[in-house]
Image: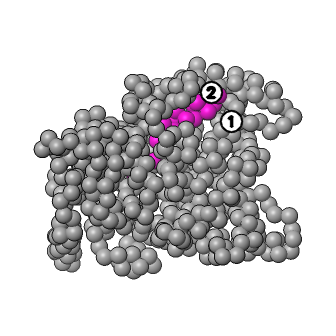
Amino acid sequence: MGIILGVTLLVACFTVILIFKLSISRDDVSSIPGPPSKSWLFGNLLEFVLGLPSGKTEFGWMSKYGMVHRFKACFGQERLMVSDPTALRYILSNPTLFVKSPSHQLINLVAFGEGSLLHAKGEVHSRIRSVMNPMFSAANVRALTPILEKAAQDLSERWESVSGSVIDVYRAMHNTSLQAVGEGIMGHDIHGDTAFAASYANLVNSAAKRSNATILGDAILSRLPAATASILKNFPPPELRPFLDHRKMTSALATRLLNTKTEALRLGIEPEKDLFSVLVGENAELSSSKMTFEEIKNQFGTITVAGEDTTANTLVWVLFVLSQNPQWQDQLREEVYQAFADNSDSFLDYDRLPFLNALIKETLRFYSTVPHTERISAEETVIPLSEPITTSTGKVLNEVKLNKGRYVTIAIACYQRLTSVWGADANEFKPSRWMQGEAAQGASLGPYANLLCFLGGPRTCIGWRFAILETQVVLCELIRKFTFSLPDDVHLQPAYAITLVPVDGDGKSYLPLRVDRLE
């Protein structure tokens, strides 16, 4: 059986290579400088995806080869890595021209279903996005402030009873973020739903796994016929089984919640403040662009994953930085104390706290929660550049010609370390850069502070305002009541696990901090 499986995989590999070579004619990518391949089977992917600390490899490539360079993937496939702001703007502004890879589309289909924001394409995505945009308006998100403050207060109450202990802040931030998403967006107590919480944790853990096998599996999957996705959607391989299991659980929960919200609307009952209740009400007023029940239902899983994981990890990295810089803790604490004293009878406007927001922005820049993502050119195109590049043959390019089917890596973390955008000190963690006028020079990307952590263009993260407010609220609550310090024997480094996470020498994702209650 093992021999048969091995031969089958070998034939599949050679078929993949043949299809790839026949489908890609020569464009500019092959002549663009880049790092030498480490192996024919994996190219540069092992050092890029699995290398520690995360970022070291691509930052080194960018320093040596520039903002646009070539690197090798599995089976000798050549890919383009891009951090050039002009090129990134073009790629992100054209989502039908630069589409998600087959492996990413399959995962999104299995995990979230047809019509989810992460899987929908073209006119369907545009229609769903237009209906959902008001759901995440500044006013609707701001109305959730009491819910987010309650989630933060619940956390601080738990910590008060264990003051002086070393706490896994990584796990605590994820629990709090899941509570915030559940109550603020879904209108559901996820903490009290242990089955859902366990299923979600299994999903996240499965998605975060990275190994030689997963890299090779992605490469093979990306070259299989498109019809394969419809088969694997309901009969996924073992590594995708947690995605399907969680989709089924989310579907059942979403059906129950939506039926309740729809019935309340029919009876004229005052709707809850959660954002899906807002969506149900606004969608009912629409005609031709209205979302179906199934489409709304399939957003629950998408919003949970997109809203919880990245925000929790942003909080983790902010607290990691603060734990090593007590002077910044003092500065933030003083600012927060003063703000609460001045707003004792009204909601606090968190956007008006300069150091708080400088700290958040610098964390998002320096520790990009999603370091990179990838797209495939759906047809032949030409990418414009902000600076010319010189090919290995000496030709100067002001734009890069791509053939259909070319993989492009959107190097988010690299863009956020560009000295041409962020200054000569781009590789330093420096919150003060955000308190001295415009931090980014000559760039206009993303919905927030010229950062790409929420991507940009038509597929900008729809919940970015919610993520920022949650981060602001939780940090203000914690810094008012606790001090944080990193134990001397703890040594962590950033690792790529879909999002950027701190890991120890054994690869465990966690952040142990000593947490002390302020007297």
| Residue matched to label 1 | 351
User: Residue flagged by tag 2: what amino acid is it?
Assistant: Phe
Number of other residues with Cα within 10 Å of mark 2, as a class: few under 14, some 14 to 19, many 20 or more: some
Q: Residue furthest top?
A: 327
In the displayed structure, 248 sits above or below 66; it is: below
Alpha carbons under labels 2 and 1: distance apart: 10 Å
In the figure, residue 492 lies in which quadrant?
top left
Foreground residue, 456 or 453? 456
Q: Residue 114 location in percent, x, y?
A: 52, 74
The way the protein has been coloured in the rendering is one colour
Question: SS of the residue at dot 2?
Answer: helix
Q: What residue is drawn where x is 43% and y is 48%?
A: 89
Instruction: Please give the name of the residue rendered at 56% of the width and 26% of the height, measured from the top-left corner.
Output: 437
Nearer to us in this view, 159 or 128: 128
Left/right of residue 277 with respect to residue 501 in the rendered view: right
Quarter in which the C terminus is drawn: top right
Query: Do callouts 2 and 1 mark residues in contact (Cβ within 8 Å)?
Result: no
Span colored in magenta: 354-373
Vertical side of 403 occupied by 247: above or below: below
Residue nearest the observer in this picture, 165 or 405:
405
Name the residue beneath numbered marker 2. 355
Neighbor class of circle 1 (other Cα within 10 Å; few <14, some 14-19, many 20+) is few
| Nearer to the camera, 166 or 246 | 246
Disc 1 element: helix
What is the x, y in percent for residue 12?
21, 73
Kind of residue at badge 1: Asp
